[in-house]
Amino acid sequence: MEFLKVNLNEPVRFDSAGEFLSESNWTHAQRSIPDYELIIGVNETVYMREEEQSFEVGPGDILLLSPGRRHGGYQASKPGVKFYWIHFYFPDEPATLSDEEMKLEAEQISMRPERSFSVQDLYLPRYMRIEQWDRINILVNQILHVANSNYWTHQSLNYLLTSLLVEISENVLNRLTFKGTGPKGDVNFNKILEWTKIHAAEALTVAEIAEKFNYNKDYLSRLFKQNTSAGPLEFIHMVRIAKAKELLSRTALPVKDIATEVGFTDEKYFMRMFKKHVNMTPSQFRNAYHRTFMNNV
């Protein structure tokens, strides 16, 4: 896999963005463009080829296409295929890193005495599955909203897009710098964390999670605090709220249905928890990101 290394002294330059949806079989046109294009899969699979490389971009996958390289579809996508697309330019020519070079960079970063906020470059993959999808989704919808809201501030979209690319870069660095290392105090905690995320919409209790993994309940609570800065129930609420934010920004489901979908049986309790975590109501959050541009050709 290739990575782009981009200096962050200036924000990237936004060009255009939208949300693509096709209700029939669809194949991307063959073309070459003068700017970079970021494709983020949402539903079904986009079958793309750039020069001689082929990619399957499914939900949660990202693909970064380069200027001057011919790309297009090599197979028809199913009806309902949906993805976000963003065109932009880098202020300076990025460096290209091989997989091994990227691993070396990540290793050097991880060895710094002060690692927090020490990186001054973006590390962007040509193709990758995103793990922190909820944050990516919210940033994309904010970009689409601002792009269609006639903001006065000149650099608004440049900085928002740069923030999105920083989030992707953080995904890359987290994946490489933490690979093979366990969390504080317990090497099995990642399994517990992932299982909790998957089952967060169910009626989970701390005792049930502890029993599932043969842990003492108090010890499990301490592990969550050490590794997530939240107790087990608070962590579950965070996962549920993140999913609710995604559904609010990309669907028209009623708030009551979203509450049930993410695991809250009481709509009023869901609204209280949402406001506690997001500092606005679900309806206010939805209205903040309602302006998008959708195309189907």
Image (spheres, helix red, strand yellow):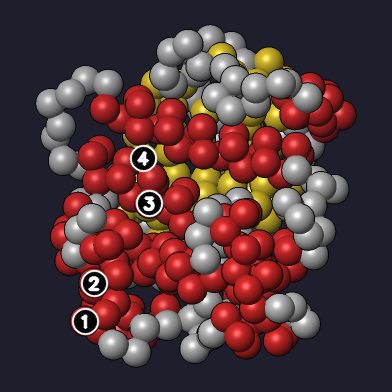
Q: Which numbered disc, 2 or 4, marks the residue that appears first in the sequence?
A: 4
Residue hosting label 1: 268
Disc 2 residue type? Arg
Q: CA distance from mark 2 to mark 4?
A: 34 Å
In front of the other: 169 or 12: 169
* Displayed quadrant of residue 274: bottom left
The single residue placed furthest to the front in the displayed view is 218
Residues tagged 1 and 2 counted as in contact (Cβ below 8 A): yes
Q: What secondary structure is found at the residue carrying circle 4?
A: strand
Residue drawn at point x = 57 percent, y = 17 percent? 120
Q: Which numbered disc, 2 or 3, marks the residue that appears first in the sequence?
A: 3
Crowding near pointer 4: few (<14 within 10 Å), some, many (20+)?
many
Residues tagged 2 and 3 counted as in contact (Cβ below 8 A): no
Q: CA distance from mark 4 to mark 3?
A: 14 Å
Residue 26 screen position, x and y as percent: 52, 62
In this rendering, is residue 15 above or below 61? above
